Amino acid sequence: MIDLTVVWAAIIAFAVAAYVVMDGFDLGIGILFPTFRVGEERDRAMNSIAPVWDGNETWLVLGGGGLMAAFPLAYAIILPALYAPMIAMLLGLVFRGVAFEFRWRDPNHRWIWDAAFCAGSLFAAFAQGMTLGALLQGVHVEGRGYAGGWWDWLTPFTLLTGASLVVGYALLGAGWLIWKTDGATQAHARRLARPLVVALVVAIACVSAATPFLEGRYYERWFGWPGVLAAAQMPILVAIAAFVLWRGLSRARDWLPFLMTLVLFGLSMTGLGISIYPDVIPGRVTIWEAAAPERSQAFMLIGAVLLVPIILAYTIWAYWVFRGKVDEAGYH
Protein backbone atom coordinates (compact mmCIF):
# COMPACT_ATOMS: atom_id res chain seq x y z
CA MET A 1 0.00 0.00 0.00
CA ILE A 2 1.29 3.47 -0.91
CA ASP A 3 2.03 5.77 2.02
CA LEU A 4 0.62 9.12 0.84
CA THR A 5 2.49 10.98 3.58
CA VAL A 6 5.83 9.79 2.18
CA VAL A 7 4.66 10.64 -1.35
CA TRP A 8 3.82 14.20 -0.32
CA ALA A 9 7.08 14.55 1.57
CA ALA A 10 8.87 13.52 -1.64
CA ILE A 11 6.86 15.99 -3.74
CA ILE A 12 7.67 18.89 -1.41
CA ALA A 13 11.33 17.88 -1.19
CA PHE A 14 11.48 17.76 -5.00
CA ALA A 15 9.83 21.20 -5.28
CA VAL A 16 12.29 22.74 -2.80
CA ALA A 17 15.26 21.11 -4.56
CA ALA A 18 13.99 22.32 -7.96
CA TYR A 19 13.63 25.84 -6.60
CA VAL A 20 17.15 25.86 -5.13
CA VAL A 21 18.62 24.61 -8.41
CA MET A 22 16.64 26.84 -10.75
CA ASP A 23 16.23 30.06 -8.80
CA GLY A 24 19.64 29.70 -7.18
CA PHE A 25 21.62 30.69 -10.25
CA ASP A 26 19.61 33.84 -10.97
CA LEU A 27 19.84 34.88 -7.32
CA GLY A 28 23.57 34.21 -7.66
CA ILE A 29 23.81 36.50 -10.67
CA GLY A 30 22.12 39.21 -8.62
CA ILE A 31 24.63 38.69 -5.80
CA LEU A 32 27.53 39.01 -8.25
CA PHE A 33 25.95 41.86 -10.20
CA PRO A 34 28.02 44.76 -8.77
CA THR A 35 31.23 43.04 -9.90
CA PHE A 36 30.23 43.28 -13.57
CA ARG A 37 30.98 46.36 -15.62
CA VAL A 38 28.09 48.72 -16.32
CA GLY A 39 26.90 48.20 -19.86
CA GLU A 40 27.51 45.06 -21.89
CA GLU A 41 28.55 42.75 -19.03
CA ARG A 42 25.52 43.58 -16.89
CA ASP A 43 23.17 43.44 -19.87
CA ARG A 44 24.44 40.00 -20.83
CA ALA A 45 24.06 38.73 -17.28
CA MET A 46 20.47 39.98 -17.13
CA ASN A 47 19.59 38.66 -20.59
CA SER A 48 20.87 35.20 -19.67
CA ILE A 49 18.13 34.78 -17.04
CA ALA A 50 15.39 36.97 -18.55
CA PRO A 51 13.41 34.11 -20.18
CA VAL A 52 13.40 31.81 -17.13
CA TRP A 53 13.81 33.69 -13.85
CA ASP A 54 10.12 34.29 -13.16
CA GLY A 55 9.05 30.71 -13.90
CA ASN A 56 11.72 29.36 -11.57
CA GLU A 57 9.78 30.65 -8.57
CA THR A 58 6.87 28.35 -9.43
CA TRP A 59 8.65 25.68 -7.42
CA LEU A 60 8.78 27.89 -4.32
CA VAL A 61 5.01 28.35 -4.51
CA LEU A 62 4.53 24.60 -4.94
CA GLY A 63 6.78 23.81 -1.97
CA GLY A 64 5.15 26.37 0.35
CA GLY A 65 1.61 25.58 -0.76
CA GLY A 66 2.24 21.85 -0.55
CA LEU A 67 3.58 22.19 2.99
CA MET A 68 0.48 24.11 4.09
CA ALA A 69 -1.93 21.65 2.47
CA ALA A 70 -0.22 18.32 3.12
CA PHE A 71 1.44 19.05 6.48
CA PRO A 72 -0.70 21.75 8.13
CA LEU A 73 0.68 21.17 11.63
CA ALA A 74 4.24 21.69 10.43
CA TYR A 75 3.17 24.84 8.57
CA ALA A 76 1.43 26.18 11.69
CA ILE A 77 4.58 25.66 13.79
CA ILE A 78 7.25 26.69 11.30
CA LEU A 79 5.64 29.93 10.11
CA PRO A 80 5.52 31.75 13.49
CA ALA A 81 8.99 30.43 14.34
CA LEU A 82 10.47 31.85 11.14
CA TYR A 83 8.35 34.90 10.39
CA ALA A 84 11.29 37.32 10.28
CA PRO A 85 13.61 35.50 7.83
CA MET A 86 10.72 34.41 5.64
CA ILE A 87 9.35 37.95 5.39
CA ALA A 88 12.87 39.16 4.59
CA MET A 89 13.10 36.53 1.85
CA LEU A 90 9.78 37.54 0.30
CA LEU A 91 10.65 41.23 0.41
CA GLY A 92 13.98 40.46 -1.23
CA LEU A 93 12.25 38.55 -4.01
CA VAL A 94 9.81 41.43 -4.51
CA PHE A 95 12.64 43.98 -4.72
CA ARG A 96 14.50 41.79 -7.17
CA GLY A 97 11.46 41.27 -9.39
CA VAL A 98 10.56 44.96 -9.49
CA ALA A 99 14.18 45.93 -10.17
CA PHE A 100 14.42 43.38 -12.99
CA GLU A 101 11.45 44.87 -14.81
CA PHE A 102 12.12 48.55 -14.17
CA ARG A 103 15.81 48.31 -15.08
CA TRP A 104 14.84 48.18 -18.76
CA ARG A 105 11.94 50.62 -18.55
CA ASP A 106 13.65 53.37 -16.58
CA PRO A 107 17.18 53.69 -17.98
CA ASN A 108 17.68 57.12 -16.38
CA HIS A 109 17.68 55.49 -12.94
CA ARG A 110 19.23 52.18 -13.90
CA TRP A 111 21.85 52.40 -11.16
CA ILE A 112 19.07 52.39 -8.54
CA TRP A 113 17.44 49.31 -10.05
CA ASP A 114 20.82 47.57 -10.34
CA ALA A 115 21.41 48.19 -6.64
CA ALA A 116 17.90 46.96 -5.79
CA PHE A 117 18.42 43.84 -7.92
CA CYS A 118 21.62 43.02 -6.05
CA ALA A 119 20.22 43.84 -2.60
CA GLY A 120 17.03 41.86 -3.20
CA SER A 121 18.98 38.82 -4.41
CA LEU A 122 21.39 39.01 -1.48
CA PHE A 123 18.66 39.39 1.15
CA ALA A 124 16.56 36.58 -0.34
CA ALA A 125 19.50 34.17 -0.50
CA PHE A 126 20.74 35.01 3.01
CA ALA A 127 17.23 34.73 4.47
CA GLN A 128 16.72 31.34 2.82
CA GLY A 129 19.96 30.09 4.32
CA MET A 130 19.03 31.41 7.77
CA THR A 131 15.59 29.76 7.50
CA LEU A 132 17.25 26.44 6.77
CA GLY A 133 19.69 26.89 9.64
CA ALA A 134 16.92 27.83 12.08
CA LEU A 135 14.97 24.73 11.10
CA LEU A 136 18.03 22.52 11.45
CA GLN A 137 19.00 23.83 14.87
CA GLY A 138 15.55 23.06 16.20
CA VAL A 139 12.24 24.75 16.92
CA HIS A 140 10.81 24.92 20.44
CA VAL A 141 7.48 23.12 20.36
CA GLU A 142 5.00 22.61 23.18
CA GLY A 143 1.89 20.62 22.46
CA ARG A 144 0.94 21.51 18.91
CA GLY A 145 2.34 25.03 18.74
CA TYR A 146 5.50 27.08 18.58
CA ALA A 147 6.69 28.04 22.07
CA GLY A 148 9.93 29.85 21.31
CA GLY A 149 10.83 33.52 21.12
CA TRP A 150 10.93 36.01 18.26
CA TRP A 151 14.74 35.94 17.95
CA ASP A 152 15.30 32.18 18.29
CA TRP A 153 16.16 31.99 14.58
CA LEU A 154 19.15 34.33 14.98
CA THR A 155 22.22 32.34 16.09
CA PRO A 156 25.82 31.89 14.91
CA PHE A 157 24.76 28.68 13.15
CA THR A 158 21.99 30.38 11.16
CA LEU A 159 24.40 33.17 10.19
CA LEU A 160 26.77 30.45 8.95
CA THR A 161 24.08 28.71 6.89
CA GLY A 162 22.91 32.07 5.51
CA ALA A 163 26.41 33.02 4.38
CA SER A 164 26.98 29.50 3.00
CA LEU A 165 23.90 29.65 0.81
CA VAL A 166 24.91 33.08 -0.49
CA VAL A 167 28.29 31.62 -1.51
CA GLY A 168 26.63 28.59 -3.09
CA TYR A 169 24.17 30.68 -5.09
CA ALA A 170 26.96 33.01 -6.21
CA LEU A 171 28.91 30.02 -7.53
CA LEU A 172 25.79 28.74 -9.32
CA GLY A 173 25.41 32.17 -10.91
CA ALA A 174 29.05 32.22 -12.02
CA GLY A 175 28.69 28.71 -13.46
CA TRP A 176 25.56 29.72 -15.36
CA LEU A 177 27.35 32.70 -16.91
CA ILE A 178 30.34 30.55 -17.89
CA TRP A 179 27.90 28.26 -19.68
CA LYS A 180 25.66 30.90 -21.26
CA THR A 181 28.02 33.73 -22.18
CA ASP A 182 31.35 34.22 -23.91
CA GLY A 183 34.03 36.87 -24.21
CA ALA A 184 34.71 39.27 -21.35
CA THR A 185 31.61 38.28 -19.38
CA GLN A 186 32.55 34.61 -19.38
CA ALA A 187 36.18 35.37 -18.49
CA HIS A 188 35.03 37.50 -15.57
CA ALA A 189 32.70 34.75 -14.36
CA ARG A 190 35.58 32.24 -14.45
CA ARG A 191 37.71 34.56 -12.32
CA LEU A 192 34.91 34.93 -9.79
CA ALA A 193 34.27 31.19 -9.65
CA ARG A 194 37.71 30.14 -8.38
CA PRO A 195 37.58 31.76 -4.93
CA LEU A 196 33.90 30.84 -4.69
CA VAL A 197 34.73 27.13 -5.11
CA VAL A 198 37.14 27.32 -2.18
CA ALA A 199 34.65 29.29 -0.09
CA LEU A 200 31.83 26.83 -0.81
CA VAL A 201 33.91 23.77 0.12
CA VAL A 202 34.91 25.47 3.38
CA ALA A 203 31.27 26.40 4.05
CA ILE A 204 30.07 22.83 3.41
CA ALA A 205 32.76 21.51 5.76
CA CYS A 206 31.82 23.97 8.53
CA VAL A 207 28.07 23.33 8.29
CA SER A 208 28.62 19.56 8.10
CA ALA A 209 30.88 19.63 11.15
CA ALA A 210 28.39 21.63 13.22
CA THR A 211 25.14 19.91 12.23
CA PRO A 212 25.55 16.52 14.03
CA PHE A 213 25.95 18.33 17.35
CA LEU A 214 22.76 20.39 17.03
CA GLU A 215 20.45 17.48 17.74
CA GLY A 216 21.09 14.02 19.20
CA ARG A 217 19.20 12.32 16.40
CA TYR A 218 21.46 13.91 13.79
CA TYR A 219 24.48 12.36 15.48
CA GLU A 220 22.80 8.95 15.62
CA ARG A 221 21.74 9.05 11.98
CA TRP A 222 25.19 10.05 10.74
CA PHE A 223 27.43 8.00 13.00
CA GLY A 224 25.18 5.10 13.96
CA TRP A 225 24.68 2.01 11.83
CA PRO A 226 23.90 2.04 8.89
CA GLY A 227 23.98 5.84 8.53
CA VAL A 228 27.75 5.88 8.98
CA LEU A 229 28.06 4.14 5.59
CA ALA A 230 26.62 7.22 3.89
CA ALA A 231 28.45 9.66 6.18
CA ALA A 232 31.81 8.13 5.30
CA GLN A 233 31.23 8.62 1.57
CA MET A 234 30.06 12.23 1.64
CA PRO A 235 33.44 13.95 2.22
CA ILE A 236 34.99 11.85 -0.55
CA LEU A 237 32.21 12.67 -3.01
CA VAL A 238 32.34 16.39 -2.14
CA ALA A 239 36.12 16.41 -2.65
CA ILE A 240 35.81 14.67 -6.03
CA ALA A 241 33.07 17.04 -7.21
CA ALA A 242 35.05 20.08 -6.07
CA PHE A 243 38.19 18.83 -7.84
CA VAL A 244 36.32 18.24 -11.11
CA LEU A 245 34.70 21.67 -10.76
CA TRP A 246 38.08 23.34 -10.21
CA ARG A 247 39.59 21.60 -13.23
CA GLY A 248 36.51 22.44 -15.30
CA LEU A 249 37.09 26.16 -14.79
CA SER A 250 40.20 26.02 -16.97
CA ARG A 251 38.76 23.83 -19.73
CA ALA A 252 36.58 24.45 -22.76
CA ARG A 253 33.57 22.53 -21.44
CA ASP A 254 31.53 25.56 -20.49
CA TRP A 255 28.70 23.50 -19.00
CA LEU A 256 30.92 21.57 -16.57
CA PRO A 257 31.31 24.19 -13.76
CA PHE A 258 27.54 24.68 -13.54
CA LEU A 259 26.90 20.93 -13.56
CA MET A 260 29.46 20.20 -10.85
CA THR A 261 28.10 23.01 -8.67
CA LEU A 262 24.71 21.33 -8.97
CA VAL A 263 26.36 18.07 -7.87
CA LEU A 264 27.72 19.83 -4.76
CA PHE A 265 24.24 21.16 -4.02
CA GLY A 266 22.80 17.68 -4.58
CA LEU A 267 25.25 16.11 -2.14
CA SER A 268 24.47 18.81 0.43
CA MET A 269 20.73 18.25 0.08
CA THR A 270 21.23 14.50 0.37
CA GLY A 271 23.10 15.03 3.62
CA LEU A 272 20.31 17.30 4.81
CA GLY A 273 17.75 14.61 4.00
CA ILE A 274 19.72 11.98 5.90
CA SER A 275 19.87 14.28 8.92
CA ILE A 276 16.20 15.20 9.03
CA TYR A 277 14.14 12.30 7.70
CA PRO A 278 11.55 11.26 8.81
CA ASP A 279 11.04 14.49 10.76
CA VAL A 280 9.47 17.59 9.25
CA ILE A 281 10.43 19.61 12.32
CA PRO A 282 13.74 18.05 13.40
CA GLY A 283 13.57 16.25 16.70
CA ARG A 284 9.99 17.38 17.35
CA VAL A 285 7.42 16.39 14.73
CA THR A 286 7.54 13.57 12.16
CA ILE A 287 5.95 13.76 8.73
CA TRP A 288 3.18 11.39 9.88
CA GLU A 289 2.37 13.47 12.96
CA ALA A 290 2.15 16.65 10.86
CA ALA A 291 0.24 15.16 7.92
CA ALA A 292 -3.24 16.11 6.77
CA PRO A 293 -5.94 13.40 6.75
CA GLU A 294 -5.40 10.69 4.17
CA ARG A 295 -8.47 11.67 2.16
CA SER A 296 -7.18 15.22 1.87
CA GLN A 297 -3.79 13.99 0.72
CA ALA A 298 -5.40 11.73 -1.88
CA PHE A 299 -7.58 14.56 -3.20
CA MET A 300 -4.61 16.93 -3.48
CA LEU A 301 -2.49 14.25 -5.10
CA ILE A 302 -4.86 14.22 -8.08
CA GLY A 303 -4.06 17.87 -8.71
CA ALA A 304 -0.33 17.32 -8.19
CA VAL A 305 -0.28 14.40 -10.63
CA LEU A 306 -1.87 16.64 -13.26
CA LEU A 307 0.01 19.88 -12.59
CA VAL A 308 3.58 18.81 -11.79
CA PRO A 309 4.16 17.17 -15.20
CA ILE A 310 2.77 20.31 -16.89
CA ILE A 311 5.12 22.52 -14.88
CA LEU A 312 8.03 20.23 -15.72
CA ALA A 313 7.08 20.22 -19.40
CA TYR A 314 6.94 24.00 -19.84
CA THR A 315 10.09 24.44 -17.75
CA ILE A 316 12.02 21.97 -19.91
CA TRP A 317 10.61 23.59 -23.07
CA ALA A 318 11.65 27.07 -21.94
CA TYR A 319 15.20 25.96 -21.19
CA TRP A 320 15.36 24.10 -24.50
CA VAL A 321 14.20 27.10 -26.52
CA PHE A 322 16.78 29.36 -24.83
CA ARG A 323 19.61 26.83 -24.91
CA GLY A 324 22.27 28.83 -26.73
CA LYS A 325 24.69 31.56 -25.80
CA VAL A 326 23.51 35.07 -24.99
CA ASP A 327 24.85 38.51 -25.89
CA GLU A 328 23.73 42.05 -25.06
CA ALA A 329 20.81 41.71 -27.52
CA GLY A 330 19.58 38.39 -26.14
CA TYR A 331 19.81 34.70 -27.01
CA HIS A 332 21.02 33.58 -30.43
Image: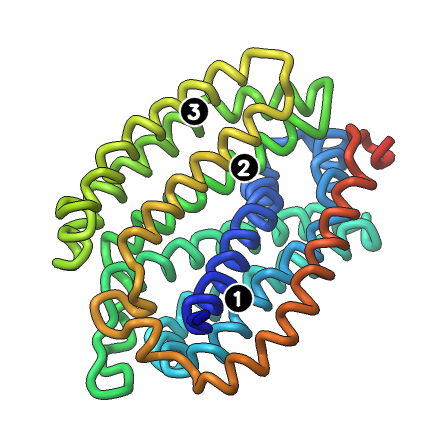
Q: What amino acid does circle 2 point to? A: Leu
Closer to viewer: mark 1 or mark 2: 1
Which element type, helix, strand or loop, lies under badge 2?
A: helix
Q: CA distance from mark 1 to mark 3?
A: 32 Å
Q: Nearer the viewer, residue 293 or 81?
A: 293
Specify the amino acid type for callout 3. Answer: Pro
User: Percent position (x, y) of residue 287?
Assistant: 35, 72
Residue on which the image places disc 1: 63
Tag shown at residue 172: 2
* Tag 1 and tag 2, C-beta contact below 8 Å: no
Q: Is residue 54 above or below residue 260?
A: below
What is the quadrant of residue 235 in the picture? top left
The amino acid sitting under disc 1 is: Gly
The earlier-in-sequence mark between 3 and 2 is: 2
- Which circle's residue, 1 or 3, is located before the other in the chain? 1
Q: Secondary structure at mark 3?
A: helix
Whether residue 43 sits left or right of residue 131 in the image: it is: right
Instruction: State if disc 3 and disc 1 touch (CB < 8 Å).
Output: no
Seen at 69% across and 55% down, the residue is 312
Say which mark, if any, is on residue 246. Answer: none
Marks 1 and 2, how far apart at CA: 21 Å
Residue 99 visible in the snapshot:
no
The percent position of residue 262, horizontal first and vertical second, equals 51, 37
Name the foreground residue: 278 vs 113: 278
Is 329 situated above or below 210? above
The quadrant the N terminus occupies is bottom left
